[in-house]
Image (cartoon, grey):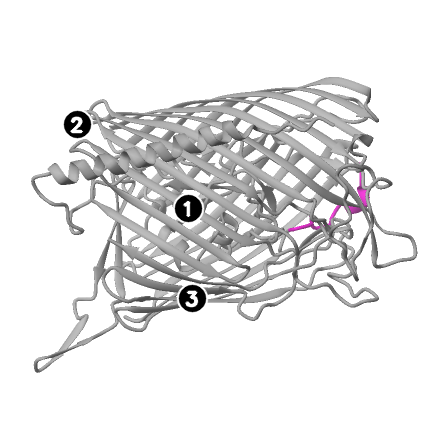
């Protein structure tokens, strides 16, 4: 058996590099602080190059004086004004257009809200976002998987560049939310700017960047599932033209499923250099090591959705073995250059390299239970060993000018990425894998020495490249804003694939997946005088597909999609109330469909249509209470499937038809804040045959924070307060995943 793994020396070199850079920046700051003629206090205005500067207008009557006594009153934020710097680029348009003025469905979840909800993952951060089923595999931590408007996506974007994924295996780089300043969500196709993207939408994680004032945060967090976490975020000036930031985190916890564990080490140093008045450079090194993660080990519907002879399984049910394992290591250095050529012309260059690898030992269910039993589960043990290297660069030239009645922000861009990945898959077969008695599980049955992993082997070397050229014109004429864009992508993928049984190669082929596609967007929004802004848009997407038709051996074409969307946004004059209503219709073609018996037998004859609406809003009820609510209805339908014609007209699996959320913040005093939320999901099907509907679920989350003194803040949160056991999603009757159980944590944060 060939087992690909990185030597300890290589892993130690990567870790040492990240640590050395972080220490060097911290020491440089200390020397600068000692030699600086003036101290830098907490009230200094941040460097204008920071991505977003948020200024809150506080209630001027925060204290009520009676005689010589002062009584503290709740310190509620009455108004939040968001000021964007010249270097800001929004996810929706790659320009400085305010998201509230963008003709699309757009959400920004900032770091403050992420901390309120104690979100450990992007999936958790999206729990209250309408139109997104974010935890269909809530017990799995190896990737960020969610459905947006009925379409699945695995790959996030990080600072505007897609995190690499070869589209075939399990290695998907992730960025911990603690290293994220904000999570931005754009719904609907976005290929006119980003090329390879899901038709449902995209999620972009905005990295934390250096600031010009000294700020340090140290956080300790403990919780159930044996959670232990320590995190550090420090930033400040190294010199008058150089700022640093160091984000680091160490987390350990038990996985939800029995015998599983999670462990993560994050080190993320960055430097920002103001080379001249017109040129700035940002260097970022992201390193994340996950020696223990929870793989996707499914459970059958009998025992989870339905009662078995022994009843139902608990939320910690597991169909794996102590032998199961998943580890991942990611190193991503990047450089960003912003150049203000003149008052009207700016240039932005981003270059990022990714070096990642993953090792997996796992199991999948083989046809369900042993005949005549509802407790003895057939399983197949397998391993995957994957490596990936990727180069990505995006170059943007923006030119602003005015015609007689219209202002233009013209954007030209060229993006190129190159990925070289490899994967080796071993499979022990059902005959070589011990069965599992779910009513009395034994998690120590696998013997590594005798496990016949050479029963089946598949090797793949994948080389991919993508070149995208795009142009966009953002036009403003009085109260009307129009965004029009086109992007042409050329995608090339060559896969060398070999298959072997018992060590003997029986099939070898080269699969060439090439695609050339132009995607567009035309959108407009009109700002009425009463705070209402109606908008409409048409947008397209494409996704290259790796693989071939098992009947004709022809390479798959890219999947494409078109969306029509209309909606209205509202923002009150005092900014205390805002809301959005969106109606959409998305049609996707060239969907890959598989044989129900053999998932490797695939054709490309599917089509899916998803239509529905989303409504969300927030309001400051008074000086003490803020509320936010949302509801979404997603009607996804399989409209074509020549392989499985019986499913036409059905709803795809893992898509919730209804989702409703309510969140409230209560500012009890100027030191104490309490939070509570309720979320509901319903209408999710058991499988694409729609043989049954999963039970709906309503969950409650609570939290709060207390400022002990100006430096220390105590926080607490409980997700799934009543510890409800439920099934998060099923792919079919043999593959289901439990929803996240109750998670409790307390944190102590020191800010200085």
The foreground one among 602 and 116 is: 116
Q: Is residue 172 found left or right of 33 in the rendered image? A: right
Q: SS at mark 1?
A: strand
Labelled disc at residue 446: none
Residue 177 in view (yes/no): yes
Q: SS at mark 3?
A: strand
Which mark is nearer the camera, 3 or 1? 1
Q: Which residue is mark 2?
A: 277
Residue 475 in view (yes/no): no
The residues colored magenta run 643-654
- The answer to which quarter of the image holds residue 469 is top left
Residue at the right extreme of this rendering: 372
Which mark is nearer the camera, 2 or 1? 1
In the rendered structure, are the residues bearing label 2 and label 1 in contact, judged by CB atoms less than 8 Å apart? no
Disc nearer the start of the sequence (2/1)? 1
Give the quarter of the figure containing the N terminus.
top right
């Amino acid at each position: 058996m060939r087992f690909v793994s990185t030597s300890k020396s290589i892993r130690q070199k990567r870790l040492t590099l990240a640590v050395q850079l972080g220490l060097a920046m911290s020491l440089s700051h200390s020397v600068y602080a000692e030699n600086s003629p003036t101290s830098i206090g907490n009230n200094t205005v941040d460097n204008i190059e920071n991505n977003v500067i948020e200024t809150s207008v506080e209630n001027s009557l925060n204290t009520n004086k009676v005689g010589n006594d002062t009584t503290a009153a709740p310190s509620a934020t009455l108004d939040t004004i968001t000021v964007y710097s010249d270097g800001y680029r929004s996810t929706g348009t790659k320009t400085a257009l305010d998201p509230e003025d963008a003709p699309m469905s757009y959400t920004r979840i900032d770091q403050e809200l992420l901390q309120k909800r104690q979100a450990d993952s992007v999936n958790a951060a999206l729990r209250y976002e309408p139109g997104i089923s974010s935890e269909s595999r809530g017990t799995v931590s190896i990737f960020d998987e969610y459905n947006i408007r009925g379409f699945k996506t695995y790959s996030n974007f990080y600072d505007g560049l897609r995190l690499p994924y070869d589209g075939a295996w399990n290695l998907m780089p992730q960025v911990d939310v603690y290293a994220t300043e904000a999570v931005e969500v754009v719904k609907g196709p976005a290929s006119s700017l980003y090329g390879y993207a899901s038709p449902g939408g995209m999620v972009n994680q905005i990295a934390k960047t250096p600031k010009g004032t000294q700020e340090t945060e140290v956080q300790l967090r403990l919780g159930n599932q044996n959670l232990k976490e320590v995190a550090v975020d420090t930033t400040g000036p190294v010199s008058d033209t150089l700022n640093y930031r160091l984000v680091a985190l160490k987390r350990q916890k038990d996985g939800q499923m029995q015998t599983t564990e999670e462990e993560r080490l994050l080190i993320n140093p960055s430097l920002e250099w103001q080379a001249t008045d017109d040129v700035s450079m940002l260097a970022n090194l992201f390193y994340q090591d996950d020696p223990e993660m929870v793989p996707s080990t499914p459970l059958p519907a009998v025992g989870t959705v339905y009662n078995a002879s022994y009843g139902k399984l608990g939320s910690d049910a597991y169909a794996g073995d102590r032998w199961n394992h998943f580890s991942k290591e990611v190193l991503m250095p990047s450089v960003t250059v912003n150049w203000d050529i003149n008052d009207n012309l700016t240039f932005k260059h981003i270059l990022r390299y990714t070096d990642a690898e993953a090792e997996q030992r796992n199991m999948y269910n083989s046809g369900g239970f042993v005949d005549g039993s509802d407790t003895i589960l057939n399983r197949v043990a397998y391993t995957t060993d994957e490596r990936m290297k990727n180069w990505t660069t995006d170059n943007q030239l923006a030119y602003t000018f005015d015609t007689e009645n219209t202002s233009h922000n013209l954007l030209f861009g060229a993006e190129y990425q190159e990925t070289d990945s490899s994967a080796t898959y071993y499979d022990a077969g059902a005959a070589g894998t011990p069965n599992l008695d779910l009513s009395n599980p034994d998690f120590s049955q696998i013997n590594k020495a005798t496990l016949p992993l050479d029963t089946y082997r598949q090797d793949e070397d994948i080389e991919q490249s993508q070149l995208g050229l795009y142009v966009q014109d953002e036009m403003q004429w009085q109260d009307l804003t129009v965004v029009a864009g086109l992007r042409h992508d050329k995608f090339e993928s060559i896969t060398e694939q070999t298959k072997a049984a018992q060590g003997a190669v029986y099939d070898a082929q080269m699969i060439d997946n090439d695609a050339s596609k132009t995607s567009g967007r035309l959108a407009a929004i009109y700002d009425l005088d009463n705070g209402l802004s109606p908008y409409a848009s048409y947008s397209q997407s494409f996704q290259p597909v790796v693989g071939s038709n098992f009947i004709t051996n022809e390479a798959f074409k890219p999947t494409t999609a078109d969306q029509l969307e209309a909606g209205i946004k509202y923002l009150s004059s005092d900014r205390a109330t805002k809301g959005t209503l969106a109606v959409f219709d998305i049609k996707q073609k060239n969907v890959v469909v598989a044989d129900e018996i053999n998932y490797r037998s695939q054709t490309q004859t599917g089509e899916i249509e998803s239509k529905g609406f989303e409504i969300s809003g927030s309001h400051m009820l008074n000086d003490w209470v803020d509320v936010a609510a949302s509801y979404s209805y997603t009607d996804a339908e399989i409209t074509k499937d020549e392989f499985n014609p019986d499913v036409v007209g059905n709803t795809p699996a893992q898509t919730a038809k209804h989702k409703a959320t309510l969140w409230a913040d209560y500012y009890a005093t100027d030191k104490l804040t309490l939070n509570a939320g309720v979320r509901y999901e319903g209408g999710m099907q058991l499988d694409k045959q729609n043989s049954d509907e999963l039970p709906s679920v309503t969950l409650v989350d609570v939290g709060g924070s207390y400022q002990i003194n100006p430096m220390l803040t105590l926080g607490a949160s409980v997700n799934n307060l009543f510890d409800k056991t439920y099934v998060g999603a099923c792919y079919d009757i043999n593959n289901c995943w439990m929803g996240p159980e109750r998670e409790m944590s307390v944190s102590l944060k020191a800010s200085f």
